Image: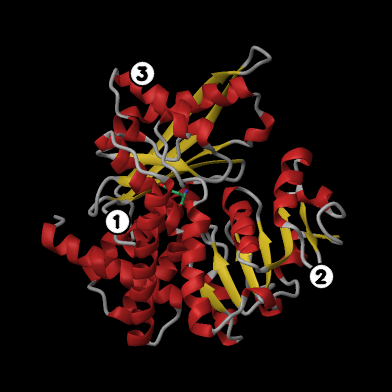
Amino acid sequence: MSLFENTLKQINEAAEIMNLEEDILTILSHPKRIIQVSLPIRMDDGKVKVFDGFRVQHNDVAGPFKGGIRYHQQVDMEEVKALATWMTMKCSVVGIPLGGGKGGIIVDPKTLSTRELEQLTRRYINRVQHNIGPDMDVPAPDVNTNGQIMAWMTDEYMKLGNINRRGVVTGKPLECGGSEGRAAATSQGGSIVWEEIAKEKGIKPGETRVVIQGFGNAGSHMARIMGEQGYKIVGVSDSKGGVYCEEGLDAPCVLKCKVEKGTVIECESQCGSCKQITNEELITADCDILVLAALENQVTEENAANVKAKYIIELANGPVTPEADKILEKNDVLVIPDILANAGGVTVSYFELVQNEAGYYWSADKVQRRLKPIMIKAYQRVSEMMQEYKCSMRQAAFISAMDRLSVMLKTRGFE
Ligand code: GLU
């Protein structure tokens, strides 16, 4: 089953529970525009190589399409369609005036030199230049893309159009018009939502063990934030594997060690008394909270029954499959769904766009003060929907999103 089919399953399920009109469901089941581009670049060995790139613009009834661009060898159109659809839902869950889009290039960026990476990035913008812009579609970072790549994208767009509109891309470095707090925003948002749940359930950080899968932007910041709050981080991993430490590990030490050694598995004895484990073992390791901050389809019908955590926080997009959802629900594992848990990232992207357009920049403190109420309100609305419809938190999040989208679609008219 493709990732997009999983997404449709989630949408259909929620639509049925809330009794969504069929016309609205049909519209939300189809991306508005799909763009596919060829990206030839001259490699360092002198030969030309062509890469494939995509941009899917799912829905813009709430505002310009919005969403990251992923560089990964396993990117495909169905995946990008799924991710774009989730972006529409995510922006609607937090109630920001943006739609949903996503992009990707089939490439393992670790195999490219810096020059090749820059060429590829600039070529992508060249190909989609007429389809993006601060009023139309605003890309951002995703898996394997970062501030430097966003800076190249912004520069290329502004050069090609001879215009100064840096709000075309978010997730930029501060010196290129980025926002304070953007780098940590995905984790910050997840942590704000989690704190609300922890308060309700009376969970104490000191007695709570956390495992984090993925140590990229989202996972590493989450390890830092939860470590600072007193949670016991007992396991972390990256694409090469993981470490598990019964007694807890020193999160700042792992952050430093990962930068120095390139992978967390080398931090085995440096940051705690840990043993190496595989990513698969990490998912079913002994803990209270499992934070999924890597890729999609990590908890599946094969391993869901063996998950020991009582709570899953989805910082990645789509890490739990619909089949796994059912098993987890039966086992009383609460899944805090991606479109709510990781929406802090796009929320601060929205702040970045607003600051760029206004040419007036906010302090880190102001970003925090504005992010928190948005996340709390989004969670409370989802929580209300959960009670009203007696459904899972994921279903409630989709209901919350589609309820808003449906009102907008009907008011504006879509024919
Ligand atoms: N790629 C991130 C996500 O999946 C951020 C998107 C954005 O900031 O536009 O939410």
Residue beneath the point at 65% across and 24% down: 113
Is residue 148 placed above or below 184 in the rendered structure?
above
Q: Which residue is the site of mark 2?
A: 246
* 290 with respect to 120 (left or right): right
Q: CA distance from mark 1 to mark 3?
A: 29 Å
Q: Residue 60 got which mark?
A: none
- Image quadrant holding the C terminus, namely bottom left
Q: Who's the residue at 38% across and 79% down the image?
A: 383
Residue 149 horizontal side relative to residue 56, left or right = right
Cα distance between the residues tagged 3 and 2: 53 Å
Q: Number of marks in the image?
A: 3
Type of amino acid under label 3: Lys
Q: Is residue 124 visible?
A: no
Look at mark 3 in the image and give the residue it sits on.
Answer: 159
Say what amino acid the circle numbered 1 marks: Ile
Mark 1 sits near ligand 1, with its Cβ under 8 Å away: no
Q: Which amino acid, mark 2?
A: Glu
- Quadrant of the image for the N terminus? bottom right
**Disc ID at residue 96:** 1
Under circle 3, the secondary element is helix
Q: What is the image's colouring?
A: secondary structure
Q: Is disc 2 placed on a helix, strand or loop?
A: loop
As measured in the structure, the alpha-carbon distance from the residue carrying label 2 to the one carrying label 1 is 41 Å
